[in-house]
Amino acid sequence: MTFLSYLINGLSLGSIYAIIALGYTMVYGIAKMLNFAHGDVIMVGAYICFYAVSAYQLPPPVGILLAMVVCTVLGMVIERLAYKPLRQATSLAVLITAIGVSYFLQNSALLLWSSTTKIFPNFFVIPRGAETSTGFSLFDGQLNISYVTVVTVLACLVIMLALTWFTGNTRMGKAMRACSEDKGAAQLMGINVDTTISVTFAIGSALAAIAGVLLCSAYPTLSPTTGSMPGIKAFTAAVFGGIGSIPGALLGGLLLGVIEILAGAYIGTQLQNAVVFAVLIVVLLVKPAGLLGRQIREKV
Amino acid sequence: MNAIKNLNKTTRNNFLTYGAVVLAYAVVQLLMGSLSSSLKGMLVPICAYVVMALSLNLTVGVLGELSLGHAGFMSVGAFSGVTAAMALQELIPFAPLRLTVSMLIGAVFAGIAGFLIGIPVLRLNGDYLAIVTLAFGEIIKSIINNLYLGLDGKGLHFSLLTDRTALDEDGLLIIGGPMGIGGIQRLSTFTAGFVLVMLSLFIIFNLVNSRTGRAIMAVRDNSIAAESIGINITKYKLIAFVTSAALAGAAGTLFAMNYTTIVANKFDFNASILILVFVVLGGLGNMFGSIVAAAALTILPEALREFDDYRMLVYAIVLILVMLATNNPAIQGFFARLRGARKGAAEQ
């Protein structure tokens, strides 16, 4: 039973990683860049929601929506100002710029919201008389599942289905796939590459806002560096599943989350990260393009 | 003057780089009396970061593989080097010699780590290689954070996760897990740093301008073409990677011996990124650029002290603007014309 509860915790954490990994993987698929600032967009989203709900007394759904809007705009502005001028530059130059943006967001947050850790409220509660209930138990109280966990896993599934439908059936989604396949050819077919990249950043950033709120609801501390470690882990998850692939991000995220929680439970929290990264290395050595990545053989 | 002109371009550039480093050392030594104490305290870290940037440039610029875990090798070098210095305290009483031996041991251990990591890592390429180096950097950090190592009359004892070293009464716990190493004798000096920078430059320049170096660059430019003319790709990749790791290890020892305590968390992902920023800003494959960028960007946050809370924000903005400016076609064209004009004037 404890194993089952670890597994459920792992799936919940993995769902958050998967949502973040989607942002990385979509941007990578289309713009061929590692957007290191993505983790910090998560942090911004969580702060916006936190202040909307605790300082302005807005209802939580409005807070989440507001966070999504702010992050979407932020993502598009970052893309327009920092990444678009570098479309022709080397990938390393873009990487360093992304790191600059990441520092910028972290330090802006530090100045705006101070370094004091905020305790994030748990929105996912059901009032039951005088008390509020944060979860339910199964098997005579042997297994406790919180509502956050349920909402997180459901949100992840809904987002995944919606994105799969979006990239498969809409005009913009098809344009995205075309751009990730061959940008030059897509442009010749009349696809506006700039708009497509912009929309990709917008979607990725909106997802980051959701991930930020879910992350902070499950692990209720919020500081300007909250986003960086989940960001790195989610990026790892994206590579794990095969970067550029949407189902790969889901698979990679879930596996990484489960491995992390199980390693923490059975080996020790100090070596948790080491185990996660060791598994990643082994997987990449066996399947160098990730679990669901396409192995492209170079022809001469 | 003519003799300098007649040298080929690479040799001339290399000598200019050596000259610039010697000049910088001489100027700093002359001004030593008038330097502020905070700047004086930064001299050794600057040297360590310069060597880190040079060694990473060997991997990223010359070998052409992105490494995001370079601080891991610095960490291995720092911890093994300092451990050696503490263990050899009575055997080698002469401090500069003990520092040299420690740096050598740090370099050897980091080189071994580089070899072990390099074998699997170098089979991958591009972003996958980058993420695996990141992973190894984090693993090294986690392991050292949980490593306990002590010394007593019977020799070295170590354990993972919890302190099970069971030392004798007169034993000394050197690495204390998350506490790192405490009570380090601060052996590092600016002169030692300068010597290490010169030595790194010498090793890198001679490697790059040799048959081996040309093979490494051939692998970078087109690995398939290089393989087809009989270059053993894995071997040359490993040579570059291990050299880079060993230099980073020596720099790690130098860095650690400048402080009384050192913890593994200091060598995290952010430290690796910081060094990568030096390399990219200085120019890939450009060793002089790495030196200038490492020195300037280590001093910059200090120089921005008057901005106080805003200094890291300013640092971020400067970083973004520099990247945008150096990749702007208009500005690039301007410099290209400037260079063209100078060349034209020289020919007339």
Image (tube, rainbow, N blue to C red):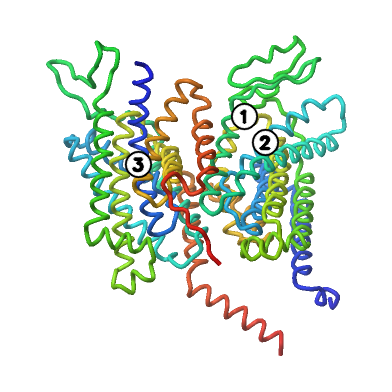
| C-alpha distance separating marks 3 and 2 | 35 Å
Q: Nearer the viewer, mark 1 or mark 3?
A: 3
Q: Position of residue B148 (x, y in %)?
A: 65, 21
Amino acid marked by disc 2: Val
Query: On the image, which quarter does residue A30 sit in?
Result: bottom left
Chain letter of the residue beneath label 2 in the structure image: B
Which type of secondary structure does the marked residue at label 1 adopt? helix
State left or right for residue B242 relative to residue A275.
right
Amino acid marked by disc 3: Leu
* Total number of numbered discs in the rendering: 3
Whether label 1 touches label 2, CB < 8 Å? yes
- Using the image as rendered, state which of residue A155 and residue B49 is in the foreground: A155
Question: Split into 4 quadrants, where in the image is the N terminus of chain B?
Answer: bottom right
- Using the image as rendered, state which of residue B41 and residue A166 is in the foreground: A166
Q: Is residue A220 above or below residue A133?
A: below
Q: Which residue is mark 2?
A: B76
Query: On the image, which quarter does residue A156 sit in?
Result: top left
- Using the image as rendered, state which of residue A77 and residue A258 is in the foreground: A258
- Using the image as rendered, state which of residue B25 and residue B121 is in the foreground: B121
Give the crowd class for mark 1: few <14, some 14-19, many >=20 residues within 10 Å: many
Question: Split into 4 quadrants, where in the image is the C terminus of chain B?
Answer: bottom right
Query: On the image, which quarter does residue B73 sit in?
Result: top right
Chain letter of the residue beneath label 1 in the structure image: B
Q: Which residue is mark 1?
A: B144
Chain letter of the residue beneath label 3 in the structure image: A
